[in-house]
Image (cartoon, rainbow, N blue to C red):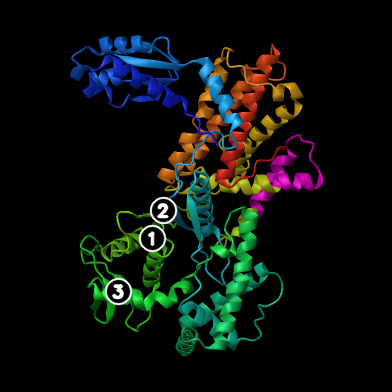
Amino acid sequence: MTEVVAAISLAEQAVSAAMARALPPELSERDPLVRSSEHADFQSNVALSLAKQAGLPPQNLARALQGELAGGPVSSTLSGPGFLNLTVADSQLWAQVEARLADHRLGIGLPLAGARTVVDYSAPNIAKEMHVGHLRTTVIGDSLVRVLAFLGGDVIRQNHLGDWGTQFGMLIQYIDEHPEAQWRGGGAGEQVSVLDGLYRAARQKFDADPEFVERARHRVVALQGGDEATLAVWRELVAVSGQAFQQLYDRLGVLLTEQDSAGESTYNPFLDEVVEELVEAGIAVDSDGTLCVFFDDVTGPDGEPVPLIVRKKDGGYGYAATDLATIRHRIRKLEANRLLYVVDARQSLHFQMIFATARRAGWLTDDVEAVHVPFGTVMGPGGTPFKTRSGGTVRLSELLDAAVEGAREAMADKPHDLTGDALERVIQAAGIGAIKYADLSTSRAKNYVFDIAQMVSLQGNTGVYMQYAHARARTILGKAPKEALEQPVDTSLPLHPAERTLILLLDGFDATVREVAQELEPHRLCGYLFSLAKALTDFYGACPVLKAETPAIRANRVALCRLTARTLAQGLDLLGLQAPDRM
């Protein structure tokens, strides 16, 4: 692996070197203030920033820096009151293309090597079908996992399944009392669908029948006490649900496996000791029989303190205790440096209290970063939360089916030479990719409208458009003669403006991926890929590739197509999308 120095870093180095020669030592080590620009490759306003301290008019200081830059790999012109417009030499940019093509990682380093991150995402409930509410956590979490791992991070995926609690006593008791409700048999997805219906029926009975409530509570006690008959049914529910979830994960193309599952029940053995530790430290206190943690800065609308309830009056533990045991385990046992919880925005207060409690307990130190990664809601066409016509929750499998059918219709309207299994694979990749890209391309903090027609469109910032851009580049490369593919890049050739724009965008891939890892916002990568795909289209329009004027120009442009195709494919993979070679 060879890490390639980005063009903007070359410009920064050149301006810094000029500052070292033109300015006194106390000013020469300041930030060169180099940024991307519409007027040149980059622009620096360092002369404006330091002119007063240097005792020079801004334009005079800019001219001095311009003189020091002359003859180097980065040239400059002056504009306005003292801006330096910076242009990287054509030969240097062609060398960037050559260097990135020669490296299997496109010249991107491993800045996160040695860092361990736990990513908590997806987290469906056992015996219930995955629905639209699981889409965002699953695809955002999966993309973050991919990005962090690509940059060298040690990433531990954690699927915090809802596999414990009073609801299982209720469901198991209902199943026991209704032997006619056959849920075993058929595929895992079918079984979970039946169980989901039984859960709703059990909830109705629980809400209406006090005697059933009592029997369900006895069943919870039996479950928690290790009654073998009850545990046997519970294990069945967990097993079949895990299989159904995995089928959806595989179809979605996310990295989660059953080995990543660490449900609420995983932490049951640690709840007593966690609570004891909090009590001994004076963090958890009794409040009318309930064990709570209070916070000076967390109050309700009435101004009264809002507590984190660690243990209920009946001695039972809620999910707060489980989450505290979880965060302690991830820090102490998994030795994570960073904890990411990809959970919807409505849980912000809960995680604020969990993190604050963990800090007071000494588990969460300055060496560990804990972050709630919130996201908005998937909305229906009317701008309300996405529901079925009857007002029910939309199943995730139905969303995927709809996206695939939308892609099938879109493919039918476009000429192609695909048939049979090859066509079906592309349709599946386009449909699943469309739904994931639509989610990821939206700033995660915002809500977005679920619109199949827009998602599978071949126009605009869509997953299908990105996949077509990649396939088009691969098609051109498939038609290129062998000598054009093997000929080295000629760094002496002048750059066409469309080539320069494309190269500078390709050079920004590294910084974009690092930005996603830092800010935890995959939509930034989507925006980058969309800009890259548009620049590729502009390049095709302005610069003939296969019919270029000379073999050397053709070889250079083929190299640009190769690098762009690889960058698009890598970027789509970091989003969890496939990049078919033909569409």
Q: Earlier in the sequence, mark 3 or mark 2?
A: 3
> Do we see residue 79 in this rendering?
no
Give the dominant element type of the magenta stretch: helix, strand or loop: helix
Q: Which residue is mark 2?
A: 374
69 versus 49 height, above or below: above
**Which callout, 3 or 1, points to the residue nearer the camera?**
3
> SS class of the residue under badge 3?
helix
Disc 3 to disc 1: CB gap under 8 Å = no
> SS class of the residue under badge 2?
loop
Q: Residues within 10 Å of mark 1 (few under 14, many from 20)?
A: few
Q: Residues within 10 Å of mark 3 (few under 14, many from 20)?
A: some
Q: Quadrant of the N terminus?
A: top right
Q: Residues within 10 Å of mark 2 (few under 14, many from 20)?
A: some
Tag shown at residue 347: 1
From the viewer's perspective, tell me whether residue 170 is left or right of residue 71: right
Nearest to the observer: residue 468 or residue 558: 558
User: Which span of residues is magenta-colored?
Assistant: 401-427
Disc 1 to disc 2: CB gap under 8 Å = yes
Q: What is the x, y in percent for residue 248?
A: 62, 60
Q: Which residue is mark 3?
A: 277
Look at label 1 and name its amino acid: Gln
Instruction: Tell me the quarter of the picture where residue 570 sits.
Output: top right
Task: Identify the residue at image location x=46%, y=77%.
Answer: 165
Look at label 3 and name its amino acid: Glu
Q: What is the x, y in percent for residue 36?
A: 42, 24
